[in-house]
Image: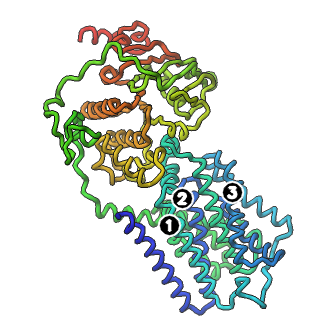
Amino acid sequence: MGARPKLIAPLAVIAIIAIAWIAVGMIVTNSYYQLMLTLVPIWAVMGLSWNLLSGYTGLISFGHAAFFGLGAYTVTIALVNYDLTPWLGIPLGTLVGAVAGIIIGYPTFRLRGHYFALSMLAYPMALLYVFEWLGYQEVPLPMKREAPAFYMQFSDYRVYIALAVALMVVSLIISLAIERSRFGMSLLAIKQNEPAAEAAGIDTLVWKMRAIMLSGAIAAAAGGLYAVVLLVVTPGSVFGMLTSAQALIVALFGGAGTLWGAPIGAVILIPLSEMLQAELGDVIPGIQGVVFGIAIILVVLLAPEGIFWRVHDHFRQAHPKPPPLPSPAGTRACPGSALYCASRASPTCDGEGKGGGTPATACNAPEKPQPATPPKRAPILTVSNLSKSFGGLRAVSEASFEVAGGEILGIIGPNGAGKTTLFNMLNGFVQPDAGEVAFAGQSLTGLKPNRICRLGIGRTFQVVRAFPRLSVLNNVIIGAYASTATDADAFAAAHKALAQVALSERADILAASLTNRELRLMELARALAGRPRLLLMDEPLAGLAGPEVENLLSVIRSLAAQGITIVIIEHTMRAMMRLAERFVVLDHGRILTTGHPSEIIKDASVIEAYLGHKWAAIRAHG
């Protein structure tokens, strides 16, 4: 029920804007201002199409004019050569734009950062020369006086205003639906931390391809209507640098990554640039480019994320929500305690979620020592002769070991031993040069991280990879997408995962405001939301104080008690001695030895390579 008002509010705003804009258009009779009232919605649509790709994924496109121009020329050529009405030409143009998105996106998404941006710039430049070479330097649309309405040629300019507003409304509704869906959440996750999105089970290439296809279709529709309004198309006007720049700048100026950024930018910058061009174009050639250049400078200096986010953050800071009381640091999740009940289902918990079965003094009871010989269990993960080199450096060399189902396995070794590289090979971020990894009998070699996650392997990182602009709950919901088919299921799985790590009270705050301990718990919850059978944890205790370490250890033990297999890299040996059932010791990429912790700490080779004689002496006298 709570989601419906959140959806109705922006729809009401869209309706009010559309009605108000058309009402103003009905009043204005000056043809120049009528043209302005038509161009603003068209460029708002163009900005929305750019935002759908670049605003939500963070991949900056300097080439959206390619889609705009293809839409414009599809409508123009269809009318000139085939007498096809723009009522059909514009939908055909959107199809051309979507196909162009596939052709452009598949090779270009292999690039990152400024390489992606520069490669996108090449497409409209190439198309500009191609259309000039084909003889389409200046193509006027033929006038169809016998059936003007059928060919979208109206004597009353207010009809064009209504058409432009209608296209903007459709684009806003599409953007709103995406923003509030798994589609939009996945794109935002990619924008804020693509490796974390992959590790959470999001197929980043698939979602980016869908985004560029839809973005190209919307931009082509804007280009098609633009051609109909101006009645003449030239390569420079639709494929030129200024076209791409306007799409980018109206979105950035208003605010990228939000529904309202492009309309805000368009309603401010388009009238300003057009009026200055009309007044000063003969005195200062290219005055429109100057306007957009100044707009970018102002945004960079005063509001780097755009006007919308500047205002949004101002009001958020002016009216902050009172912070909830955090859970006591270091509280153990004992059976029957409130923390235990918040983190897992227990027969000792009463109906109100309060502890009812174990006295509080049990939290201080000494922990049971690990058995010298753990019970025999079938392996869930098998690593065979795994090797990886980076240039002349042998990071991992012929590593072989097994992980039993339900086991807590510790991987230890000195810095540079290859522990994180080994983890990256286990979940697909790095492909091995040789060897094999099998999970539950299925080979993982060659699979991407998102596919490995969906098979049941979760991952946390040495340096926490959060989505800082999203709430804690939304961070965890993204992890739940790997194991759920509907948004409702993802929501439920995320809440369950937050309860498992006792972080439910922080669900609604931004991840950027969390402490280091809370960030690590949130990342763990995100991994748990995907319902993993195996959990890879890379130094989860890094940067935590003593009570915080105890808190996280209790959470990890509770997960193991639920049957989740855990493989953990950690340098805090005292904590690892109490947590792991078995150690794998790495040194210079090779497995030095494996065994029970009590055996490993007495091994002379381990003491020499990792623990050190001083540590061994302390243990001997302790």
Helix, strand or loop for disc 2: helix
Task: Name the spot of residue 546 as percent of width and height, x first.
Answer: 26, 30
Task: Pick whichever, 349 or 599, lies toward us.
Answer: 349
- Point out the image quarter for the C terminus: top left
Kindly check if marks 1 and 2 are in contact, taking CB atoms under 8 A apart as contact: yes
**Residue found at the very far front of the displayed protein:** 347
Task: Name the spot of residue 532 as percent of width and height, x first.
Answer: 44, 36
3 or 1: tag closer to the N-terminus? 3
The residue indicated by pointer 2 is 55
The residue that appears at 26% across and 31% down in the rendered structure is 550
Helix, strand or loop for disc 1: helix
Tell me the crowding category of disc 1: few under 14, some 14 to 19, or many 20 or more residues within 10 angstroms, Cα based. many
Task: Name the spot of residue 175 as percent of width and height, x first.
Answer: 53, 65
Give me the disc on residue 83.
none
Relative to 362, say whether 170 is above or below: below
Q: For marks 1 and 2, give the CA distance.
A: 9 Å
Q: For marks 3 and 1, give the CA distance.
A: 22 Å
The residue that appears at 70% across and 77% down in the rendered structure is 87
Tell me the crowding category of disc 3: few under 14, some 14 to 19, or many 20 or more residues within 10 angstroms, Cα based. some
Give me the disc on residue 121.
3
